[in-house]
Image: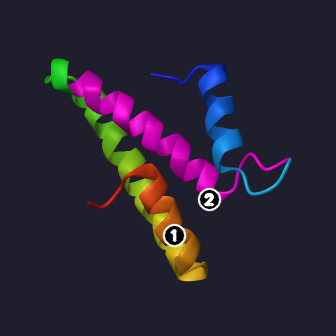
Amino acid sequence: MALLQEKKQEIISGYQTHETDTGSADVQIAMLTEKISRLSLHLRTNKKDHASRQGLLRMISSRKRLLAYVLKHDPERYRSLVTRLGLRG
């Protein structure tokens, strides 16, 4: 379930903090959110795919840790990121 290069570039350009930013927490969270939504759709049709479900849980916990990091260091950036991605409510 890898993302296409065009989709990755679109996400990076939408969430980067400066010109050469490809790995900030914002970009990583946005990438994980896209992967999680794609994998969730896959698991709705393939209910017995337990290996993918395990990967989904790992991605969710990784995103959770990154969001906690952003909240700890910059609460305002956290709030804007959550609203842009449509998370939490």
Which residue is labeled 2 in the image? 25
Is residue 8 left or right of 62 when viewed as pictured? right
Label 2 SS: helix
The disc at residue 26 is: none
Q: Which residue shows up at 30% across the image and 61% down it?
A: 88
In the rendered structure, which amino acid carries the disc numbered 1? Tyr
Given residues 34 and 80, the one toward you in this image is 80
In this orientation, does residue 86 appear? yes
Q: Quadrant of residue 22?
A: top right
Label 1 SS: helix
Given residues 76 and 30, the one toward you in this image is 76
Q: Which residues are magenta?
A: 20-43
Is residue 37 left or right of 10 when viewed as pictured? left
Q: Which residue shows up at 54% across the image and 41% down it?
A: 31
Q: Quadrant of the N terminus?
A: top left
In the rendered structure, which amino acid carries the disc numbered 2? Ala
What percent of the width, then of the height, locates residue 73?
60, 80
Is residue 62 left or right of 37 when viewed as pictured? right
Which residue is labeled 1 in the image? 78
Q: Which residue shows up at 38% across the image and 47% down it?
A: 58
